[in-house]
Image (cartoon, rainbow, N blue to C red):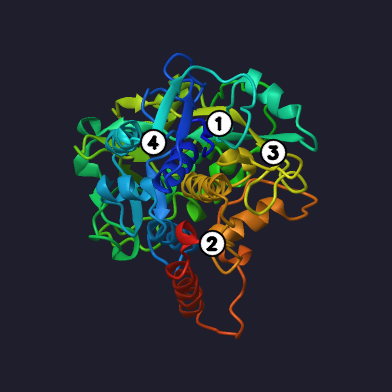
Amino acid sequence: MMETISVVGAGLAGCEAAWQAAESGVKVRLYEMKPDKMSPAHHSPLFGELVCSNSLRSNRIQNAVGLLKEEMRHLGSLVMKAADGNSVPAGGALAVDRLGFSGAITEAIRNHPLIEIVPGEVTALPEGIAVIAAGPLASDALCRAIEGLDGVSTLNFYDAAAPIVLKSSIHMEKVFRASRYDRGDGDDYLNCPMDKETYLAFVDALVHAQTAPVHGFEESMVFEGCMPVESMAKRGPMTLAFGPMKAAGLKHHAEHLFANVQLRQDDAGDEMYNMVGFQTRLLFSEQKRVFGMIPGLEDAEFVRYGVMHRNTFLNSPGFLDRHFQVLSRPGLFFAGQITGVEGYVESAASGLYAGICASCLALGREFPELTRNTAIGALGYYVSSANRSFQPMNITFSLMEPWPERMKDKMKKNGLIAERSLHLLDHLDWRNRT
């Protein structure tokens, strides 16, 4: 009798793992503690909830995360199907309507005949073949169970979410529509322009604003990709102008466009906008005051204020293999941010690969070997390779096998690496291998 796979956590990684296993013909028992118990970062009862942003980043295969998404499409990803079906304008990036995206994933999972949903908190590791995709905010009880495994050690870092404002509260006469370098439809973002004087006054207010206390917070433990905007501002007055507030690539009639704040559509109804790159731990009252200095946002109504929380991830090298399987306990897999991959897409991709490998184990098949010639395989190699200073990592081409020939044209080289990867995946048929 074929073994049922247990998957703990119905976030992006867990849903992707459950879907891949079920699509391979294996029964899955998916455990989810929401809505009975919610982590500090979650608010919706839906599966696959997006917390920090509605953006899945670049959609171009010459960009590593764009390639990662395309690889997932080639492998029948549920997350990518939901994302493509609920996309909203975002220039060259893929952004989604949050509720539509999570709703599509929830419906697909609940309606799959081989997936059984088990509500409630998991306090002990399941027996048999299992994928732990509890996320970086796993419950205390589950964390204690994980810490009991041989060879495990955990680390912490801090993550932050950006505010969301109502479009109807934005002074539209002060903003302009444009995408950097005219990508997408060329006008996918709302832009709040600043001259130099306005920018410097804003930075000064940001640096001196009051922040909310976060237990155990240390600047050195903040992941660079989610650095609070006030922390960036403290690095120097021009840091933001060359970072999330850069004006590069924008065409505008204003003569003195020195810096710029971009707002990205957050829902299909075009009613809510996310402040791009504005993760923060400012007090809510300070967010309203300081962000109100941004042209167009003087009277902004915040649907969600920025928040910050502590995340936990495994010291995966020496604990996990390249298939995201625990070395000391074959048949037990981890997936998602808890493994040390960073980002929505990377988390889902790790769940996809872990789910495939778990199903192969249940079916008595060989694992498909995704080498560093693929972006998914490169993530597996990253979390399993010796690293003296292991930290959460987004996918980059530097993690992949380099192109064998030296090339000056970076975009052409990246395109060739992408073609190589997709060609390999087109000939990968793990569901028929014994």
Which residue, given by chain and number where applicable, does mark 2 sit on? 375
Furthest toward the front, the residue is: 1
In this view of the protein, can residue 189 be seen by the observer? yes
Which amino acid, mark 3?
Leu
| Rendered image quadrant of residue 289 | top left
Quarter in which the C terminus is drawn: bottom right
Which residue, given by chain and number where applicable, does mark 4 sit on? 114
State the residue at coordinates (63%, 46%).
Answer: 392
* Precedes in sequence: disc 1 or disc 2: 1
State the residue at coordinates (52%, 21%).
Answer: 40
Q: Residues within 10 Å of mark 3 (few under 14, many from 20)?
A: many
Q: Is residue 412 left or right of residue 299?
A: right
Q: How many marks?
A: 4
Q: Nearer the viewer, residue 338 or 59?
A: 338
The CA span between labels 1 and 2 is 23 Å
Q: Is residue 99 left or right of residue 47?
A: left
